[in-house]
Amino acid sequence: MLRPAPVLMTGQSRGSRLDGGFEFAGVWDRTAVPESDLTDLSMWEAAALLRRGKVSASELLDAYLDRVDRWDGVYMAFNLVMRESAVLRARQLDDQDPVGILHGLPMGIKDNFYTRDVLTTANSHVFAGFVPDHDATVVARLRGSGAVLLGKTQMGPLATTRALTPDGDITTVNAWAPADPTVSPGGSSSGSATAVAARMAGSSIATQTGGSITNPALAQGLTGLKPTMGRVSLHGVIPLTHTRDHPGPIARDARDAAMVLQTIAGPDSSDARTLGLPSVPDYLTAATPVMQRRRPAMRWPTRLGVPPGWADAGSTRRRRARRLFLSELERLGVRIIIMEPPPRWDELTSRSFNAVRLAERSELYLDILRKDVRLFGVALPSWINGLLISGDEYLKGQRARVALLRLTIEQVFDRCDLVVQDSPIPFDMVGLPLISFPIGHSESSLRVLPEGVIVGGPPFGEERLLALAAAWQEVTDWHRRHPADPEVGVPEGGNGSRRGRLQPELVADSSE
Amino acid sequence: MPIPRVVSPRELSDDELDRYVLVRLSMAGVDLSVLPLNDPGAPVDQLRVLRSARDFLRYELHGVSQYALDPLDGPPAFYPSALTALLEDRKASASD
């Protein structure tokens, strides 16, 4: 059934918070256990089998741990596998009624989220040996909803760049090209994405400061959702940039992403950024496909802004994927609007204004910089550069963000409801929500890699983003395709890596 | 000591920018001398840090100070998107 579009950007409630009361029926149901492997199931499919008692949390966990044992030496998606606590938790969950919508579902946690009594290093010398005495709010909410925490995922040092050792040796590889470490796994949440793409986790929690949820999802054929700033608590997340860090899910599809977001979103008295915002809506319903006259349709009337030339850019396969994406959306009822960026867009989203964020990391870590700069390893230059930003430059950067947000609301979202983005940076700068998901494959004689799209929404427009992705995924199967298991001969990674080392200049250039 | 003329960082030599960076770091209490001077095999060395800092000053940061932003473009906000909720709330209250 269709329902009217929500009124966005209001301070009023747009639906009640689901406290386990969601009716998982109809399109959310699944009755058959797959013959191949339980890890082929999306989280919502696995949840249906768990609810029906056709699979236990322990069986599901075993299937994932089996893949971790077989393949994580190649992928290096995990910093730490929490085997014992995960097995214990799955057994406990098998002996009790469902505690939440993530009951029994195995998840990866990026290693910058505090996990009680578990090593939390952010892959940096700075946090070597650090064991928090409490969970991040996000982690506590995942546990409370019944998620089984499989392990801490690899990341760029202090969330700066693709997953590396602190000294720059490549660790995590893209699950679609494990034999070629030069194929980027996408950004600092590399491990979170590779774990899901390689079916070593049902979904993962990640963070984004400059693209690191949406880019790894794009690179590995997944659905990544970066919520509006403040929608998800950052309490207990090792900070990189207070005003730009965003936690969110990397998942198989829009429904899985909605399940995670529904669990972690909402006010947290430990994080003032989450307070006084619109109520958390019903993301599960938003991500539930709808039918109109027996055909899949959009949940809400939707105008999608697309930059001129977007569908004609890149390789032949990319162009084909983008054109098919737009034509299929039109069949679903989306109105495509080709839109020039507003005046001043390029200046306000330039590298210069993006650079002012570096002052925040330098201020945060100044005591440690004073103690020993070597602790920052290969990521040091961006911390040094942040110290060169003056107060007036930093404040002009903040004013530029306000100007950019106003431009986006008044001259972008006046013409469309959602907008395709070439880069996540502009929406990261102003804290607006983004989703990325697969729309095709680019194939060469060497390999097959996913093609995807990034779509941005207005403040607190996560429902609309999920609905768009869910409708697209209802009529396509790109999100269901996964990479083949690795072949032999993949170079070893880690310290002294034969996968290569990133130089500090490149790390600074690609830094979040 | 003569007062320097107004100059763009792109006109300054590497040595001049290096001195500026090192003095700034010194005043902030940050010591680069614990790094090797020039060791491509090390994760990072002094020369690469200084090269990155020079490029940052010349090609990234300079654009911020040169950009003319109308004073009426509003006050700075650390969390612009979250601010919209407050503003919309206020607008709704005012129109009630």
Image (cartoon, coloured by chain):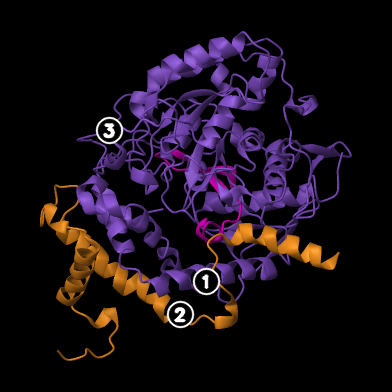
Chain colours: A purple, B orange
Query: Toward which corner of the image does residue A473 lie, by quadrant?
Result: top right
The subunit carrying tag 3 is A
Residue carrying label 3: A493
The residue segment tinted magenta is: A424-452
Disc 3 and disc 1 in contact, CB within 8 angstroms: no
Q: Amino acid at mark 1?
A: Ala
A223 left or right, relative to B8: right
* Viewer-side label of 3, 2: 2
Q: Amino acid at mark 2?
A: Tyr
Q: Position of residue A21 (x, y in %)?
A: 77, 27
Secondary structure state at the residue bearing disc 2: loop
Picture quarter with the N terminus of chain A: top right
Q: Position of residue A301 (x, y in %)?
A: 81, 52
- Give the amino acid at mark 3: Gly
The extreme top residue here reads: A95
Write down the residue under mark 2.
B67
Q: Is residue A273 above or below residue B27?
A: above
Residue that sits furthest to the front in the current view:
A269
Which residue is labeled 1 in the image? A400
**Direction from residue A194 to residue A9 in the image, left or right:** right
Label 1 with label 2: CB-CB less than 8 Å: yes
Q: Are marks 3 and 2 in contact (CB under 8 Å)?
A: no
